[in-house]
């Protein structure tokens, strides 16, 4: 599962990946990520939401037909 997640994150479009990594991997606050990216806090939240949706869809496609948890 970890490998699938890493591949999915690597496949994120750059704008989504940057926001996702700052918030979820580096565990920055929304305000910190916004300052780092030069965006508003609202834009960071939207980016994070879109990244999560993209990842969810990609992981579901990758897992189709596989038994991930026996």
Image (cartoon, helix red, strand yellow):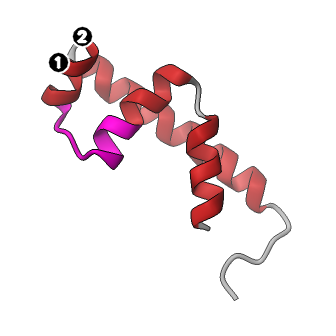
**Residue depicted at x 59% and y 48%:** 56
Residue 29, percent across and down? 16, 38
- How many numbered marks, from 0 up? 2
Q: Are marks 2 and 1 in contact (CB under 8 Å)?
A: yes
Residue 51, percent across and down? 49, 35
Q: Is residue 67 above or below residue 56?
A: below
Write the start and end of the magenta stretch as one range. 21-30
Q: Front-most of 9 and 55?
A: 9
Question: What SS does tag 1 mark?
Answer: helix
**Residue depicted at x 65% and y 58%:** 4
Q: Front-most of 70 and 32?
A: 32
The magenta stretch spans residue 62: no
Question: What SS does tag 2 mark?
Answer: loop
Quadrant containing the C terminus in the rendered view = bottom right
Residue 45, image quadrant: top left
Label 2 crowd (10 A; few <14 / some 14-19 / many >=20): few
Report, in whole angstroms, how far the alpha carbon at label 2 lies from the one at label 1: 5 Å
Where residue 35 is drawn, which disc sits there? 1
Where residue 38 is drawn, which disc sits there? 2
Where residue 63 is drawn, which disc sits there? none
Q: Front-most of 29 and 61?
A: 29
């Amino acid at each position: 599962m970890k490998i699938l997640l890493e591949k999915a994150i690597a496949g994120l479009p750059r704008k989504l990946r940057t926001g996702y990594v700052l918030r979820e991997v580096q565990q920055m606050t929304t305000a910190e990520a916004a300052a780092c990216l030069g965006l508003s806090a609202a834009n960071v939240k939207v980016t994070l939401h879109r990244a999560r949706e993209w990842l969810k869809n990609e992981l579901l496609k990758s897992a189709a037909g596989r038994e991930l948890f026996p």
